[in-house]
Amino acid sequence: MIEEQICDFGIHAGEPYSKLPACFLNWMIETNHKKQTFAKVELNRRERAVLNSRNHSNTTTL
């Protein structure tokens, strides 16, 4: 199991990146925050989850 990263700054300090709002993650990337890599990883994880969900639903409805 992969250890979940925890945000350690700002209003979301103490929260896992998986629970942070997408707008906050995007802000981290847009401002070149020093921890933007965590934001990129989380947004990519969410995108893969959506794509996998769509692919799964397409195969079950055929």
Image (tube, rainbow, N blue to C red):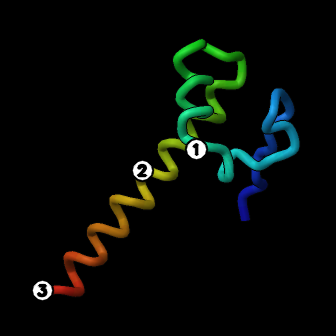
Q: Amino acid at mark 2?
A: Glu
Q: Is residue 26 left or right of residue 6?
A: left
The x and y percentages for residue 32 are: 60, 13
Label 2: which secondary element: helix
The quadrant in which the C terminus is found is: bottom left
In front of the other: 61 or 24 = 24
Q: Amino acid at mark 3?
A: Leu
Q: Amino acid at mark 1?
A: Glu
**Dot 3: within a 10 Å radius of its alpha carbon, few (fewer than 14), some, or many (20 or more) residues?**
few
Q: Which residue is mark 1?
A: 42
Where residue 57 sits, quadrant-wise, is bottom left
Query: What's the mark number on residue 47?
Result: 2
Q: Is residue 15 left or right of residue 39?
A: right
Label whose residue precedes the other's in the sequence (3 or 1): 1
Label 1: which secondary element: helix
The quadrant in which the N terminus is found is: bottom right
At 58% from the left and 44% from the top, the residue drawn is: 42
At 48% from the left and 44% from the top, the residue drawn is: 44
Label whose residue precedes the other's in the sequence (1 or 2): 1
Where residue 7 sits, quadrant-wise, is top right
Q: Is residue 13 left or right of residue 62?
A: right
The x and y percentages for residue 13 are: 85, 37
What is the CA distance from the residue labelled 2 to the residue labelled 3? 23 Å
Outermost top residue? 31
Label 3: which secondary element: loop
What is the CA distance from the residue labelled 3 to the residue labelled 1? 31 Å
**Dot 2: within a 10 Å radius of its alpha carbon, few (fewer than 14), some, or many (20 or more) residues?**
few
At 87% from the left and 44% from the top, the residue drawn is: 14
Q: Which residue is mark 3?
A: 62
- For the residues labelled 3 and 1, say whether their Cβ atoms are less than 8 Å apart: no
Where residue 12 sits, quadrant-wise, is top right
